[in-house]
Image (cartoon, rainbow, N blue to C red):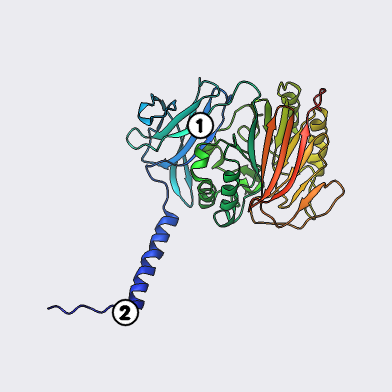
Amino acid sequence: MKKKQHIPPYTTLYRLSSWMFFSLIIFTFMGASPYPDRIVLTWAGDPAHSQAVTWRTDRSVTQAMAQIGIAQDNGDEIKAEEKVAITTPLHSDSDGAVNYHSVNFEDLAPATTYAYRVGDGKQWTEWFHFKTAALEAVPFSFLYFGDAQRDIKKNWSRVFRQAFRHASDAAFTLHAGDLINRAENDEQWGEWFNAPGWVNAVIPVIATPGNHEYVSEQDTRRLSSFWQPQFTFPQNGPEGVKESCYYIDFQGARIISLNSNEKQEEQKQWLEEVLSHNPQRWTIVTFHHPIFSPAVHRDNKELRNLWKPIFEKYHVDLVLTGHDHTYARTHAEETAYVVSVSGSKFYKLNKQPWMNRSGVETQLYQVVRIDADVLTFETYTATGILFDKFELKKQEDGK
């Protein structure tokens, strides 16, 4: 009888540890594949009649497509149309050559739940659901996040997941810039997409770029090469900042993204036009650099002088920003200005008279609800504790 070989416990542990280590290495650095990943819903047009979706594959997928149909209680009864995707090649130093694919579903029915999936005709994702916006101003909510930026997998993922557990009925998520720390770092973008996971595929994203979405090259700065391939935003902004400066009308609210990193003067003229022809009851503006800076040694005086008078002239209700890695807001009179942070990078607070509420070294998320003439704004900590709350109530004159 063959004698059983004795393997010392430490040898078994070493082999197991080695296997786990190399598996982790493979998992961490595994790039794109033919199977779709980083699926994200956005809007490129009217949310009541359209829905955009973007995803990533490796370069082997040159003919990507999506299928869509009205959602059914029996998934096998979905009658799907097929749409061919627009493909954008991208090469990054960390992930190599990949393809980003996008489809803008159009001619959809308002207030209707649709099912969609993406693939190459052979490999398909599971069916995802989304609901188009209503034509009228029915109540809705959304989630607002300040800078995620650093330690995204480690620390920001829990904030997003707590926020989704809290307000899973949110119509969209809004991100006020500095989604990541290094504009061209594919691994950080991967962490940002992995934190929400499948939620990005069922709840649309509205995002504005921060300074960390920009790359410095000699004497110029440019927006990350990842931004436009991986987000399909409206093209209704000024030349040179399309898909970073844009607006979306959703159920009685006009949501405006401004790009505070560049072409601020050009955006001022565009903003005046967009606000002067605004039929929506509520107006919400987001950009990265605060009008009122709560952090020590920070002040955006030129931006404040340029844009603030327009906000007040047209009774903008809410301005949502990031950048200063603290929490602060003005008194809830006329325009309410908010600075928040959802990640774990923090700055020191410069306490000032304009602050009605402030906080430091706390990861936060915000739930914003609009119901007829009342906007309710709530800020929560990463563990779901209420940190701040106020209401805005519309008057007859629109103020």
Who's the residue at 42% across and 50% down the image?
31
Q: Which mark is residue 130?
A: 1
Residue 340: image location, x then y, percent: 71, 47
Which element type, helix, strand or loop, lies under badge 1? strand
Residue 93 is left or right of residue 367, and the answer is: left
Q: From what the image shows, is residue 79 above or below residue 180? A: above
Residue 29 visible in rendering: yes
Q: Which mark is residue 8?
A: 2
Looking at the rendered image, the quarter that the N terminus falls into is bottom left
- Graded by Cα atoms within 10 Å as few (under 14), some (14 to 19) or many (20 or more), the crowding at tag 1 reads many
Q: Nearer the viewer, residue 374 or 131?
A: 374
- Whole-percent x, y for residue 106 in the image: 50, 22
Q: Confirm or deny contact between disc 1 and disc 2 (CB under 8 A).
A: no
> Quarter of the image holding residue 43?
top right
Answer left or right for 240 relative to 356. left
Q: Secondary structure at mark 2?
A: loop
Compare residues 16 and 131 and report the one nearer the observer.
131
